Amino acid sequence: MGLRCSRFPRTAVVRRCPVPAPPRSPSRPQRRPQPQRLAPRPPVRRKRPHWAMRAVTGLSVVVLASAGIGHALVTSLDADIDRVDPFRDMKNRPRAGHGMNVLMVGTDGRDRISPQERRRYRLGGAPCHCTDTLMIVHISEDRERASVVSLPRDSYAELPPHTDAATGRRHPGRPIKLNAAYAEGGPQLTVRTVEHMTKVKIDHYLEVDFASFMKTVDALGGVRICTVRPLKDRYSGLDLPAGTHTLKGGEALQYVRARHLDGASDLGRMQRQQRFLAALIDHATSSGVLLNPMKFRDVTRAVLGSVRADKGFGTNELLALGRAMRDFSPSSSEFTTVPIERMEYAVKGVGSTLKWDSVKADRVFQALRNDRPLAAARPARVPVRVVDVAPQQIRVQVENGTRTPGLGRRADAALAATGFRTTRLPVNAARQDVRRTVVAHDPRWDRSARSLAAALPGSELRAVKGQGATLKVIVGADYRGVTKVRGEPPRAPGASTVVRGDEAGCS
């Protein structure tokens, strides 16, 4: 039986198979050969999109296209994209760099969600025609890296002089909050303001809302996220215990909207949005969604049917870019937020804003202009699990529960090397026939015990009342070493770090 080329490439061998594509006709798309060119352009949404989740939706379009699925499946969806011209009559724009820059904008579209869903997911109130989330997504010229920079909605911004599209009235430049640019001048003024502030030329514009975000996540079958501590926000309705969860559309919306979980407010919310993006990319590239034509069609319709995009983005560009990015993965992505110098920068007539750190922010945008990674190159990373309690806060006594000489000493040294405060005096356990490693702990120190157990895969948690603050590890015959763990350090207000996609997702 001869080897057949797959139209749904996944491996390096299959990818070399030619993908036939029929020429179009008014009635149905036909196949025609695709030109060998990379057309850097991503999609965008319909009229009233909303939060960063829409950014999630937009990035997923590019990821989903990486399947290289036939032209016929997607061509007919081109007409579903609502078009907008955010670059009309724009002059004195920044110089184009290498790679592609997409401005992803989230707007409020709660009026497109049913009353039942609005009540269930706490989407009360009237929709505001403004942006609550803005991200610049940079796709490198070699299509091997995506850099996502979140722009806080309350950022202090200088609105450039502009003409009101409705009245024709000329307005001078003035200070505003960044999210107000959309309310005053729509996509065009939003692009102009972002380019003015960042000196980064925007190549494409993508706009998404609540409805499109929920439909996309549901079409993917949900997205898996993990949290080391419970997340509860009475405003958004989010209520997640610590652990791993697969979130469907409405729950995912609550997760990326929540901003009352801690003192970090919008900055903490942006970090969760970045984690969700990483998880979505991981799911889209590692699951069978991209290899299932019908599933791919459903997801693509969920995205393209409810976004607004600039006129330069079309099906051919999406597929060409997708074929170039078929090896894209979470480790190829990196996320950061614009560095903040002052958290409550008062501006007369505007209110409390976030003032960017001009020096550090310029380094971020310079990296985008020069098509360079946001984070410095580093050697291959050993996977590290994030735990609720840092190892440095956990005191441990190690006991050897086997007849293997020196096993307790080796386990003690491995735990100490990971940061645990071991006694450095391992002893033999009362029993020498322990098969499964045990973490014995006082119930009052259960969070520490779970963090220690994470470093000992397969270990058993055993509560012992009155044991005290020192945890006990009884090494069993199943011991195969220690997994490196770290606590999640509190992030200073305004601090900005670069996180790669494989770090932002679940361990």
Image (cartoon, helix red, strand yellow):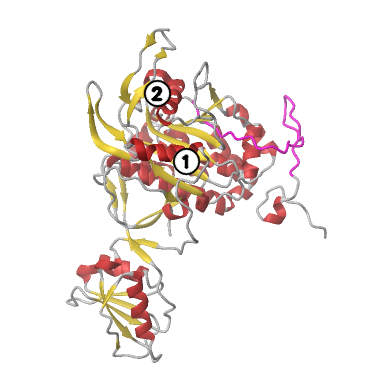
- Point out residue 127 in the picture as x, y percentages from the top left corner: 35, 26
Q: Nearer the viewer, residue 258 or 349?
A: 349
Residue 107, labelled with which disc?
Answer: none
Q: Amino acid at mark 1?
A: Ala
- The tally of labels here is 2
What span is in magenta?
19-46
Please name the residue shown 39% across and 41% down the image. 253
Q: Nearer the viewer, residue 83 or 243?
A: 83
In the structure shown, which secondary structural element does the residue marked by tag 1 occupy?
helix
- Point out residue 348 in the picture as x, y percentages from the top left corner: 22, 22
In the structure shown, which secondary structural element does the residue marked by tag 2 occupy?
helix
Q: Is residue 506 left or right of residue 237?
A: right
Quadrant placement of the N terminus: bottom right
Q: Residue 338: tell me if it is visible.
A: no
Cα–Cα span, label 2 and label 1: 26 Å
Q: Does the magenta-highlighted stretch encompass residue 47?
A: no
> Which residue is the extreme one toward the front?
359
Residue 367, labelled with which disc?
Answer: 1
Is 103 above or below relative to 278?
A: above
Quadrant placement of the C terminus: bottom left
- Would you name the residue on which mark 2 appears? 182
